[in-house]
Image (spheres, grey):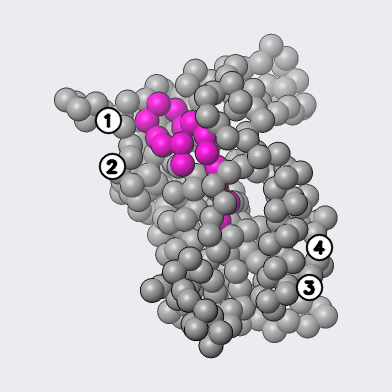
Amino acid sequence: MRPWILEEVNYGHVKANPYHVAVLPMGATEPHNLHLPYGTDTYQVNAIARRACAEATAKGAKVVMLPAIPYGTETNMMNFPLAMNVLPSTLLAVFRDLIDSLGRHNVRRLVILNGHGGNDFKPFLRELYGRAGVHLFLCDWFRGLSADAHAEIFETRDDHAGEVETSLMLHIAPNLVARDAETGALRADAGATRATRLPSINKGWLSITRPWHLLTTNSGSGNPMKATAEKGKSMMDLLVSRLTESLVELSAAELDEKFPF
């Protein structure tokens, strides 16, 4: 039994060892180019959360990892088979119920660990602010937690199934990364994307929800060919270190009317 993973612990342990911080991993079920599994986002957030909660617990934090939610918003991926969509309004309802549960059980700090770029949870923090006395924190691991380090570890920029995600999967689940049996090369395309016909969108003056079947060839955005397990380990170590520090801080912080100020 790992006491920081709710799926594994029993009531006897929970009854005697109350938690201060809950971590909710948010994944997705969607294609990731031709070579990565549909559950890539969920594999990644689970791996990050498990290690960070373990290390935070070792440092005295009272933290628990909730079971991951393996679905996210896929409205712009629905032309790819078996992209499994859950609308933002549905996810908001799920969050509301889970927050009410945590508040009822006196767990007053929730970290939402998001691994799917199609999930936009910042509005949820505003709508659910103060609900059930639970303080909400959002961690998009591919944004704030690691954005400053991408250029130090990786050679290319991407946002879906490219060098970053492929490297992470080569580190945590290499058996699920498709390779050519003879050459060992990744069975993936180069992840090229198409520009729109509107310069205002291409320049970033206007934004849209991107239809991925028009933007990409096989759902990949970013070239995965320079990915390595070593790069994935470097990124994972960084993510875990930073999230662990955050969890230790949250667990130790005093809750009063001015928290977190």
Tag 2 residue: 175
What kind of residue is marked 1? Answer: Arg
Instruction: Please tell me which of labels 2 and 4 falls first in the chain.
Output: 4
Name the spot of residue 57 as percent of width and height, x first. Answer: 47, 77
- Distance of mark 4 from mark 3, alpha carbons? 9 Å
Tag 3 residue: 133
What kind of residue is marked 2? Answer: Asn
Judged by depth in the image, the label closer to the viewer, 4 or 3, is: 3
Q: Is residue 29 magenta?
A: yes
Judged by depth in the image, the label closer to the viewer, 1 or 3, is: 3
Tag 4 residue: 129
- Distance of mark 2 from mark 3, alpha carbons? 43 Å
Question: Based on the displayed image, in which of its 4 quarters is residue 106 positioned?
Answer: bottom right
Identify which residue is drawn at 55% across, 31% down.
83
Question: Please, is residue 65 above or below residue 203 in the view?
Answer: below
Taking the view exactly as shown, the residue that stands out farthest to the top is 197
